[in-house]
Image (cartoon, rainbow, N blue to C red):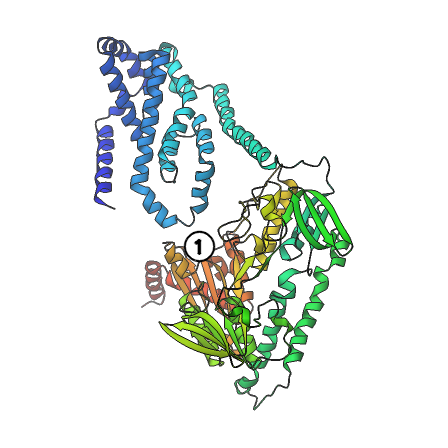
Amino acid sequence: MTAPRIILLLFMASFISLFFYFDLEHYFTLEMLKMQQAAIENYRMAHPLLATVSYALVYIVVTALSLPGATLLTLAGGAVFGLLWGTVIVSFASSIGASLAFLAARFLLRDSVQAKFGERLKAVNAGVEKEGGFYLLSLRLVPVFPFFMINLLMGLTKMRLLTFYGISQIGMLAGTIVYVNAGTQLGKINSLSGILSPALLGSFVLLGFFPLLAKKIITLIGENKIYKKWRKPKKFDNNIIVIGGGAAGLVTAYIASAVKAKVTLIEKHKMGGDCLNTGCVPSKALIKTGKVLSLVPRAKEFGIYALSADFTFAEVMERVQNVVQTIAPHDSVRRYTELGVTVMEGSAKLVSPWEVVVTTKTGVETISARSIVIAAGARPLIPPIPGLDKIDYLTSDNIWTLREPPKSLLILGGGPIGSELAQSFARLGVRVIQIEMAARLLMREDVEVSAAIVAKFRKEGIDVRLEHIAKEFVVKNGAKILLAEHKGQTVRIPFDQVLLAMGRVANTADYGLQELGVQLSERQTVQINAFQETNFPNIYACGDVAGPFQFTHTAAHQAWYASVNALFGTFKRFRTDYSVIPWATFTDPEVARVGLNEQEAQAQNIAYETSIYGIDDLDRAITDSEAHGFVKVLTVPGKDKILGVTIVGEHAGDLIAEFVLAMKYKLGLNKVLGTIHIYPTMAEANKYVAGVWKKQHQPKNILAWAAKFHTWRRGE
């Protein structure tokens, strides 16, 4: 804490201590006020200006230091100065004092609170910035809430001082008038608690709803302004129109149909979206084949003299497509039609907030709905690298069409997609060169996670090039070459084919968003609020097109909120819950995570403890010759509350589920430790890491006494 803060804190503490030490509180009682009322009035009449200033200063100090007595002083204002001037003086003095308390809390505590809990308070700060005035006004109008607590808590937020002062001045006026008026009838008051009758208190509570009502009115005015360009249909063809038949769109349509809403789903390409056709499903099918092939050179580890594998690249890629076709009926037009969804295969274009023009093979049709859900997904990012347009590059969309293996495959990107495909193609015998501009792969994971993956990749023959920045593609004498910068030097990297795996961008063009005026975020995703709403209250977005996560499971998660809010938001809305989001990278070893890892905790200045269990010690991992990796759990210091978990190892994506459940339902490591886990399984690693935490928090004093007790029982 800085010197000015220490000085202010000492001053305030000293003043408050003196107040209670000299028992000044007894001067702020109803009995004392009645006894001294005549003397005070005489002094006011003799020295009107000095009395007014002195009274206001005392009121300001009491309010600023959150001392008891504000209620009594308000009564005194009415008794001494009358209703009009008493109200004026108290109104300004109370608002100034509240603002000083607000500033003191901000000066002394806000920086440290924001530094320690900044990430968690992002939503609070955003809410205060957008709607804090309404809620402050509601709190000021309801005297049930202690005003000094409101002053201090608001000081910890990013609310502007002028906003706080202005709303406090207005919001406290009603209560001020009631108390000042009561003070004018001081002789009739027997106790402070009698000033506010239950009926009057109830009136204040109802008064507190006025800001919320005002907010609703302002919202309606804003909506009318947004919608004024279009004529709203008197009736609608659907309850919901869903644009996009990927994970988010399918779940949205499924939920709507399940609650008997009329829903139309529009998909212009393939049902199932990226996950089924070009993402999760084909990549995991390829990973499985690669896993089988990786066991061949490891035959001796399993007591087998030798193994061999006879395959063709084309057959492996055909198997991938067969897997896609086997799963496709789950997401098919037929299935969703049977569920009651109207499926239209064609391109959509928003022409009003309620209407969509659909172009199909058979013609053009305009359909309407009370709500529209955008679930248009994302596509691979194509970086603006000079010369890229001169070569036939691959992405995660079209790499599945390969039937001949590249002689050498250059992969740009060290994230999950690039890493999964790099290892898979390397295991199929392709020479793989992986380029990453950062200092390590999987930058969102902790350092030791990245190190484990890089070590495994290099052991399997993948040429991992870190800190290489792609600058230009050139074709010379038919040879393709990447010019990359590495530590200030230009490096020439020849290759046969290149795969771009540098991220994905939301699909926001060519279906009317810009023309309609749907707002985009800085990341060029559809801008949504906490309820999946866009700036048009009846238009929602979910999945990759909205972010912030681009996972199939989070797309489905968001879709539930989008669908339910679109259908029932008039009566009850649900905020999307991002508190526990897991994900996995399906390299070998797998990497799975939920909650915070160490680098995130450090960046957010969140205190934590770590418990690490090495899977190389796990019986099942040893029997399977997969004794590698670890489970790392971050907990609140001194407690078993889980902040985050990272697992590296065989089946990490499955093992993480237990911790997802634990975090979701606030179960600590003691609960995990007390749960029976089947022996021998990989899941025992979760129990053992809980045991590591328990061992680190042994009650040493109790155990010392237990040792003495057992020694005594032995008669020694």
Place residue 142 in its image quadrant.
Answer: top left
Q: Residue at x 55, y 47 (%)?
A: 576
Q: Mark 1 packing: few (<14 Cα in 10 Å), some, or many (20+)?
A: some
Where residue 534 appears, as percent x and y from the top left, is: 57, 44
* In this picture, residue 272 sits left or right of residue 466: right
Query: Residue 481 at x, y = what percent?
Result: 48, 77
According to the image, label 1 marks what residue? 641
What's the residue at 60%, 88% (across, down)?
A: 308
Going by the image, does 146 lie left or right of 573? Answer: left
Q: For residue 681, say whether it is visible.
A: no
Q: Nearer the viewer, residue 66 or 130?
A: 130
Q: Nearer the viewer, residue 227 or 115?
A: 227
The quarter of the picture where the C terminus appears is bottom left
Q: Is residue 403 visible?
A: yes
> Which residue appears farthest toward the bottom when viewing the image?
305
Q: Quadrant of residue 79?
A: top left
Going by the numbered disc 1, the residue's amino acid type is: Lys
Towards the viewer: 301 or 411: 411
Q: How far from the left and from the top, in percent, is residue 553?
A: 59, 58
As drawn, 624 above or below 513: below
Q: Secondary structure at mark 1?
A: loop
Query: What number of labels is visible?
Result: 1
Rendered location of residue 328, percent (x, y): 70, 64
